[in-house]
Image (cartoon, rainbow, N blue to C red):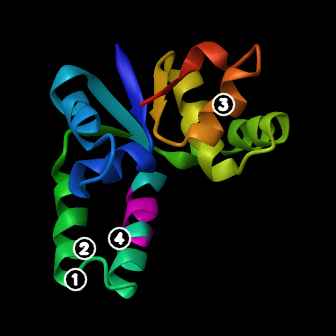
Amino acid sequence: MTLIVDASVVLKWVIQEDGSDQARSLISADTLAAPDLLFIECANVLWVKARRGVLSADNAKMALAAIEATPVRIIPVHQHAAAAQSIAFDLDQTPYDCLYLAAALSERAILVSADAAFVKAASAHPVYRNSVRLL
């Protein structure tokens, strides 16, 4: 089965935090896919962490390179923008986050996210509840 992974999961591959081991286990256990937005979201989080002194700029760059090297099938964003916006209105969540769910629905896959608030909102909706899973 294909799993759609979002930035909250993928960043755990390169930043040690709660759930990192579980997130890393997905790499070898499943077929992974994500909208191409994933890379800029990860780059932004890593940049913020470097600006705050949590990571060095070099470590942030290496972390992004490691993410880019991971076998994740990339899905073009433009195919799912309208669906993401509709889901955002349904769930009162950002279109950025809903893009991953829109991709999961289109791919007949499951979105795996570490964003508990998003998963809670999607799980409460009858249309989306079976397409999302908390890491």
The answer to which of marks 2 and 3 sits earlier in the sequence is 2
Quadrant hosting residue 32: top left
User: Which amino acid type corresponds to the residue marked 3 in the rendered image?
Assistant: Lys
Q: Which residue, given by chain and number where applicable, does mark 2 sit on? A: 60
Callout 2: SS = helix
**Mark closer to the observer (1, 2):** 1
Q: CA distance from mark 3 to mark 4?
A: 25 Å
Q: Write down the residue under mark 4.
A: 46
Q: Position of residue 36 (x, y in %)?
A: 43, 50
User: Mark 2 and mark 1 in contact (Cβ < 8 Å)?
Assistant: yes
Q: Tell me which numbered mark, 3 or 1, is placed earlier along the sequence.
A: 1
Q: Is residue 37 left or right of residue 17?
A: right
Please, what is the three-letter code of the amino acid marked with disc 2? Answer: Ala
- How far apart are labels 2 and 4 at the CA level? 5 Å
Work out whether 30 lies above or below 33. Answer: above
Residue 4: image x %, image y %? 43, 31
Callout 3: helix, strand or loop? helix
In space, the residues marked 3 and 1 are separated at their CA atoms by: 33 Å
